[in-house]
Image (tube, grey):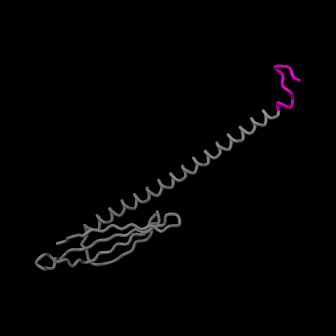
Amino acid sequence: MTTPGKRSLRAGKPIRAYILLEVILAAGIFAVAGISLASALNTMANVYLKARTEAEVRLEMETRLAQARILPLTPMKERSEPDARGVVYEKEVSLLEITNDDKVVLTNLYRLSLRAFWKEGREDQEELAEIYVYQP
């Protein structure tokens, strides 16, 4: 029999094993939480980079469309060389044949379209911007 305040050797083993089990379980939960956080941060960084690239491409497309509207337009199609980000721009100008309510063909109307092509990881990306331009 044991005296109060003293434990037998046999009674101490289950307590130590239980504490070890708690430590291992806590370490496992902490590891899962850490891996989940790292994965979420990686996903957020990828989304940010993709959104930034798309915003840069859209801004470049707006600039190219504004520049093309200023110059005299003739029907044509041209493709640019890849820029620093690897984006290829394809500009197409075509003459529009639009008639009014009196069946009169409206002249000097052009469709100016600009496409951007680039790779985002393994996926091909494409963006299209198009406007109608009247040049008297």
Image position of 70 with respect to 106: above or below = above
Report the residue at 30% width, 68% height from top.
130
- Check the image and name the residue furthest to the left: 102
**10 vs 53, nearest the viewer:** 10
Between 7 and 78, the one nearer to me in the picture: 7
**At 86% across and 20% down in the image, what residue appears?**
3
The location of residue 51, given as percent across then percent down, is 44, 56
Residue that protrudes farthest toward the right in the picture: 1
Residue sitting at x 83%, y 30%: 11
- Going by the image, does 111 lie left or right of 116? left
Give the quarter of the figure containing the N terminus. Answer: top right
Q: Quadrant of residue 127?
A: bottom left
2 drawn magenta: yes
Report the magenta residues as a range: 1-12
Q: Is residue 98 left or right of residue 23?
A: left
Magenta span dominant secondary structure: loop
Looking at the picture, tell me which residue is in the foreground, 80 or 27: 27
Tell me where residue 95 appears, x and y as whole percent: 24, 78
- Res 19 → quadrant: top right
Please identify the quadrant where the C terminus is shown: bottom left
Judge whether residue 118 is colored magenta.
no
Give x and y (percent) for residue 82: 45, 69
From the viewer's perspective, is 63 left or right of 24?
A: left
